Amino acid sequence: MKLKRNISFFKKVKKIAPFFKAHDLNRYNRIKNKEPYMKKNILCFIVIVSLFIISLAGIPTCTQPDVDTDTPPPSNANLSFIIISTGTLNPNFSRDITFYTVSVEYEISSFVVTPIKEDNNSSIQIRINYGNYYPVISGSPSNSLSLNIGNNTIEIQVTAQSGKKKTYTIIVTRNGSSSSSSSSSVSSSSSSSISSHASSSLSSSSSSSSSSSSSSSSSSVDSDGPSGSVTINSGDTYTTSRSVTLSISALDDSGVTQMKISNDGSTWTTYSYTTSKLWPLSSGDGTKTVYIKFKDSLGNWGTVYHDSIILDTTGPTGSITINSGDAYTTSRSVTLSISASDIAGVTQMQISNDGSSWTTYSYAASRSWTLTSGDDGTRTIYIKFKDSLENWSSVYSDSIKLDMYSTIKVTFDQIYVFNDGDPILNGELYWWFGGKIIGGKIYAFYGDERVRDNPLSVNNETTYQIDWIWTFEILNNDTSYFEVSCEMGENDNPLDDDYLGIFSRYYYYNNGGWGTGSYYKDLSGTEASVRIYYNIQRTDSH
């Protein structure tokens, strides 16, 4: 493969060789006249020689490296450097050192920090004296940070793409008085002293010098306590446990010996100084603040430092309402109105028809749901919620009455027969009652047969007491209906041709016609007529 590349290269060189030969004289003249042509050809020669060397060496062409699509997000939360506007970091910056001090003069009333991150995927935010964090672009200066007299705590929090956090703390100590003012005061005092006591200057000067030296020595005694910081659970925003880990830093010229920790800033517990400590937060969910202060080897206690975290040990609170709070529904398909809240945010919910078998969904304020099948009656839906910290709530519920069916009761009370001609019934008289349901719990037929053994041989009216009752359930919708029919004849099979008459009527669920009524019918082929008295009642379960 390498040999082929070399042959190809020489072929290309052979093609461009005449160009150089044809221009030898011209090139000489240009060089003689000091024109830039020589520089161009030298550059061309260098490029050709470089390509030739690469060809001989068999250096492979660049290829796109394989991308590991399963690589987890970066977790680098380090800074590569911190630039400050004035003063000197103590100790010198190192990516693994997270606590620094800086001293500035009284005249320095503001401070600027320029953090530089190691990983481009991480983000940076800054705050001073435990105020609110605000974002800062890597390599760009922060806002001007106002300095109080004394210690000022500047925190630089770096968050990796994976969510890992790391906080760098800078304690900036601003001196309490102006250096120029002090210098001016000393100079004025010395001048006045010399002018007033010139005759005894040596003795007085010696005594003053000794006193000044003693005063200077006395003022250099360490009377300030240590400066420091505390971070709860590496700077996490939330915790689900009262037991947390405190990351502690403190610095003092004479050394740090002790520390006091408190949950309220008034009741303190003393420990030997250490950089890490397990600590129990106070009970009850919400924002928790831990306070800390340090003592040096000379017995000086420093100012109080603190950090906060949100304790969330319980799941969300919520509610559920079926069909906007309706008392009953005629359909198994319902709409759920859902509400939930949590300090850590609501992420999921589970819904059930029985409180034991659950279906999980992403949290939403509304959802369609299907009630269980079966007889009409009360249906209860159960729901519970999960927050971003995996805390599940207690179970909430709402109920509604399912009323899909109405009860229909059909009663035939009497049959009245009037015959104004010759007797026509010489045998037994049969009645056959029946019905059909469309839209009921089942598609059903119902039949009942009654026999009267006395023939209708009289010419006057005759009334027969029947008391035939049919009870069934029908769906509560516009398409549901039922049919009631009655047939009469001398044969025990009312479908035969010798029947005397048939009655039939349809009732739809949403139409009228309920209550007491009657049918009238002239009997086929006779001078007799029949009237049937009935009563139809509808009972809704709600």
Image (spheres, rainbow, N blue to C red):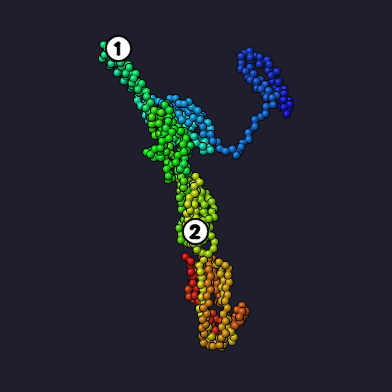
Give the residue drawn at x 61%, y 80%. 492
Image spot of residue 122 (x, y percent): 52, 35
Q: Secondary structure at mark 2?
A: strand
Could you give the CA–CA distance between mark 2 and mark 1, rounded to whole angstroms? Answer: 104 Å
Give the residue drawn at x 66%, y 29%. 61
| Tag nearer the camera, 2 or 1 | 1
**Observer-nearest of 239 and 62:** 239
**Observer-nearest of 92 and 38:** 92
In the displayed structure, 483 sits above or below 46; it is: below
Give the residue drawn at x 61%, y 37%. 68
Q: Give the residue type at disc 1.
A: Leu
Q: Which residue is mark 1?
A: 202
Residue count near mark 1 (Cα–Cα under 10 Å), binned few <14, some 14–19, many ≥20: few
Q: Earlier in the sequence, mark 2 or mark 1?
A: 1
Q: Secondary structure at mark 1?
A: helix
**Observer-nearest of 276 and 102:** 276
Asked whether residue 369 is in view, the answer is: no
Image spot of residue 340 (x, y percent): 46, 50
